[in-house]
């Protein structure tokens, strides 16, 4: 834009000189020169920031890079300000592989993918830190530093095994802080691949198989224990049921014996109070029918020879009063 301003001024002066040589300088010609100069100055003040970009202002009269940035669209500044444009869209980078030493002095080779962007508010920080947008090599150095800071806390088996995700989370947090200091916002960081050589990986596979077999054996033991526990509970329950049934029967017998004892006690009390109580018991138990055979004290036998329609009763004669 400064070049446009200079060109406009030079053009205006040249026009006036040419017109002066021809002795045709008048009000109209001066107006034309002024218009040319004004257009040049105005054009040098206009800045256009495209979508997905932010304008960084470099003002030599105000100390260089300014924290105040220019947003999208047509913007105006004074002619001596230089505007640098940086992208605010997401950037996705897949880095070349690199190796980092782990806790057990084994080396793991990482392939990392990084997604990041830049906020408008922090654009001036990015420009100051990287003199523009960072290159892939600049960011790879930051990633390697983050992994080197965290990988020594894990052995190679942890890195390739169960703590893979934990390491990734720690590296991502470390890298996010580093990038934010330079004005960049980390969106995501992923380990595309981690390699430790065939020997280590085969050992890890074998270790994983053994671990799986151990877990399966532990599971079978747990199932057997649960089955045995269930059988024990069933047996104990059956035992308790038998005990309860036996106790119930014993209690029933005890109640019956107690009732009989109480009945006998009541009978004894009644006998003690009234001797005729025995006769009462006998008559209470009689069904109203006479016996067919009755034996007397002298051996006399009385037979009931009546049929159902007869009211006569055959009574044998007294031996003492009978005549031969």
Image: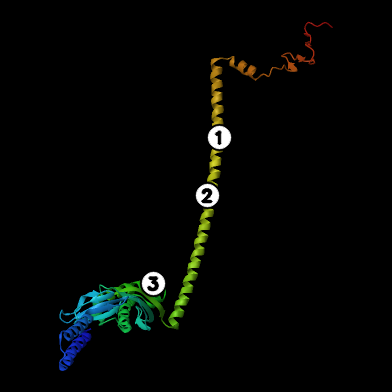
Which image quarter holds the C terminus? Answer: top right
Q: Residue at x 49, y 73 (%)?
A: 209
Which image quarter holds the N terminus? Answer: bottom left
Q: Residue at x 16, y 85 (%)?
A: 30
- Residue receiving disc 3: 165
Secondary-structure class at tag 2:
helix
| Quadrant of the image occupied by residue 7 | bottom left
| Quadrant of the image occupied by residue 142 | bottom left
Secondary-structure class at tag 3:
helix
- Callout in the foreground (3, 2): 3
- On screen, residue 232 versus residue 139, left or right, reads right
Q: Is residue 226 visible?
A: yes
State if disc 3 and disc 1 touch (CB < 8 Å): no
Q: Residue at x 43, y 83 (%)?
A: 197
State if disc 2 and disc 3 touch (CB < 8 Å): no
- On screen, residue 45 versus residue 283, left or right, reads left
Q: Which mark is residue 236?
A: 2
- Callout in the foreground (1, 3): 3
The residue closer to the viewer here, 139 or 156, is 139
Quick one: label 2, few (<14), some, or many (20+) residues within 10 Å? few
Q: Position of residue 18 (x, y in %)?
A: 18, 92
Q: Earlier in the sequence, mark 1 or mark 3?
A: 3
Residue 116, compared with residue 247, is above or below; it is below
- Residue receiving disc 1: 252
Q: Position of residue 222 (x, y in %)?
A: 49, 61
CA gap between label 1 and label 2 equals 24 Å
Q: Earlier in the sequence, mark 3 or mark 2?
A: 3
Quick one: label 1, few (<14), some, or many (20+) residues within 10 Å? few
Residue 16, compared with residue 304, is above or below; it is below
Q: Earlier in the sequence, mark 1 or mark 2?
A: 2
């Amino acid at each position: 834009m400064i070049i446009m301003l200079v060109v406009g001024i030079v053009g205006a002066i040249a026009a006036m000189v040419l017109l002066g040589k021809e002795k045709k300088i008048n009000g109209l010609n001066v107006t034309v020169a002024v218009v040319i100069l004004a257009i040049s100055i105005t054009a040098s003040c206009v800045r256009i920031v495209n979508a997905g970009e932010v304008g960084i202002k470099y003002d030599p009269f105000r100390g260089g890079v300014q924290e105040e940035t220019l947003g999208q669209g047509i913007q105006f500044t004074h002619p001596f300000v230089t505007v640098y444009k940086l992208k605010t869209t997401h950037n996705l980078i897949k880095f070349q592989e690199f190796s980092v030493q782990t806790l057990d002095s084994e080396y793991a080779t990482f392939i990392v993918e990084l997604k990041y962007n830049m906020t408008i508010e922090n654009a001036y920080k990015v420009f100051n830190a990287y003199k523009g947008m960072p290159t892939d090599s600049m960011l790879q150095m930051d990633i390697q530093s983050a992994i080197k800071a965290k990988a020594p806390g894990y052995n190679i088996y942890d890195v390739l095994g169960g703590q893979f995700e934990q390491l990734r989370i720690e590296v991502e947090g470390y890298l996010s802080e580093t990038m934010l200091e330079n004005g960049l916002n980390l969106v995501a960081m992923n380990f595309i691949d981690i390699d430790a050589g065939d020997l280590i990986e085969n050992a890890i596979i074998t270790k994983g198989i053994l671990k799986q077999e151990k877990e399966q054996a532990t599971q079978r033991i747990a199932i057997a224990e649960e089955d045995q526990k269930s059988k024990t509970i069933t047996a104990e329950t059956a035992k308790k049921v038998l005990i309860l049934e036996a106790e119930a029967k014993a209690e029933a017998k005890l109640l019956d014996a107690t009732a009989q004892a109480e009945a006998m006690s009541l009978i004894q009390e009644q006998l003690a109070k009234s001797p005729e109580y025995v006769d009462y018991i006998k008559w209470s138990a009689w069904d109203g029918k006479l016996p067919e055979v009755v034996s007397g004290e002298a051996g006399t036998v009385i037979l009931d020879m009546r049929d159902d329609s007869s009211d006569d009763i055959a009574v044998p004669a007294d031996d003492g009063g009978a005549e031969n």
